[in-house]
Image (cartoon, rainbow, N blue to C red):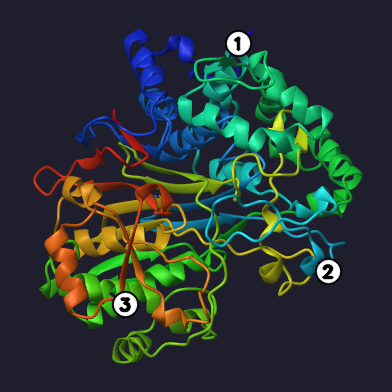
Amino acid sequence: MNSHLGQGPDLSPRNWQPAERALAEQSEMTAWPKQAKLVEGKLGLVAATLSPIAVLAGGEALRQGGNASDAAATVALTQIATALGSYVSFAGTFNLLYYEKKSARVHSLTAGWNTWLGESDPMTIPVCDMGPLPYARKPTDGAEGRKTLVPGFMAGLEAMHRRFGQLSFATLFQPAIAYAEEGLRLSPMLASYFPSRGRYLNRTPEGRAFLNQASSSTPKAGDLFIQTDLARTLRAVAERGSSYMYTGEWGQQFVRAVQREGGKATLEDMQRYQPLWQEPIKIKFLGTMVYSSGRGSFGGYRVLEALNVAEVLQLEKLGPYFHDPVAFKALSSILRATNGEWRRLPPDGRLTKSHAKAIASALGQFPDQEPPPIATDHSDSVVVVDGFGNVACVVHTINTLPWGTTGIVVGGIPISDAAGFQQTRLATLPPGSCVTMGTAPSIAIREGKPTLAIAAIGSSLVPETVRLLVGTLANRLDALTLMSAPPLLENLEPQINGAAFKQRPILVPEGAYDANFLDHLLASGVNLKQKPKQETWRGTAVMATTDPHNGRPLSVETPGVYGFAGSY
């Protein structure tokens, strides 16, 4: 049933330490750690969102001679299997920032969506159901296949492995295949998706078959969910490579399914897909070089642009934003001023110190126009530091709410509807183009050594990344203090009564900040609005930093944050 794939190590869960496996599977039933914990790496360190099983799988890759690339790939593959392809997908997107010790270089890989060559009128693509998200529009009827895009995840993962991997490609799939074949007990969080999102899968025969993999059309917490079709697909990719999902049998089935549903897919679209290796972008922030993703991801530009302004405003001389009202106001203003793709500067122009000075002098005077919707917060992030000195930061996503709304399932993989909320962005691109991503994995290097790595997800992923970078590099705060601190949020709510963008209130979760602190902000003229925590769309990050005393990598687990870490 679970025959060994690949040559060399066997990462199958049957070979894990029984106590460690049992603890990981027990922890999988909860959304976040129950208590705060500092995790110090020995041979290496793995931190990732949402799946303790995936963290353990990545640790096994390190234990058995793999490097950061091998561990990151193993984690990502396992995350998708244990998430049932809901908020992350084997037919989603993949973004990598990688520090290679051998060359002392940082590499950037973007494997986002491509549009269909035959889709010439994106503004008429049906609007998908984005549920409770604040920027959701009223769904519209139409051809479900038009909501799809060419996926990049598997091509991106294989491109990373070809350049950096040490273990065989097939080996990396072993944990994901095992949990697909043998099944996974549904957590309350996963089970909660079925009542609200299952109706879309129920639209098609293959969607109904997917729902019945727990022997019930309405799976419940604790049910065993077995993904037999997915296991077959993963075995084929492990043995034949990512081409199986582009020009092979899966790719052909995918094209036929999308065409059946009125989409514009062709095999030519699948054949021409290529992940993008690009030079990462970088700036010097308070003496430390900070790198982020290249031109395939606009999120990195915004992160580095914000850091430049923070340096101009000398935030290092202020206290942490969650204690110092002046710092809170300044950092919130910076994040608002740098928000969105609507800035018409050439990308590299956004990274200059002169541009940062111009923003700093004009805070509060930036344009009133509405920024475009930000990608949804259903994603996973991975940070790995290995014993060889390599660092991998990965963000991957289905880029929609769980399973999307197409109802299309191919080889056990539900297909995203990511084109169904990005019509305006797609309309600016020629058919067959790459769609830029909003993710921003970041690595900081000081005196030639990586000192900080961050991979963030969520609608507020940029504020999360910026607050961690500023807190670590400017305020010199420890990782546990920072990860436990309250979030900074994007305000994605629709404009009310024609209010200008700059007049929108700054959102804060109820109970997250000290009441006296908020009173001080209000008295100083800051426009605040408290919202229940369940209605705030924060970012979630995993990070690795360096112990200043012994140089070992550190990470943390914090209640209320969807992140887990393991030391190896």
Q: Earlier in the sequence, mark 3 or mark 1?
A: 1
Q: Earlier in the sequence, mark 2 or mark 3?
A: 2
Badge number at residue 121 = 2
Q: Amino acid at mark 3?
A: Ser
Write down the quadrant of residue 19 in the picture.
Answer: top left
Q: In the rendered view, does 492 fall on the left or right side of 136? A: left
Give x and y (percent) for residue 199: 71, 35
Q: In the rendered view, does 229 fall on the left or right side of 276? A: right
Badge number at residue 2 = 1
Give x and y (percent) for residue 123: 77, 69
Local SS, label 1 = loop
Q: Are marks 3 and 1 in contact (CB under 8 Å)?
A: no
Give x and y (percent) for residue 499: 48, 81
Choose between 115 and 107: the one closer to the eye.
115
Q: Is residue 192 above or below residue 471?
A: above
Q: In the rendered view, does 564 fall on the left or right side of 296? A: left
Choose between 139 and 247: the one closer to the eye.
139
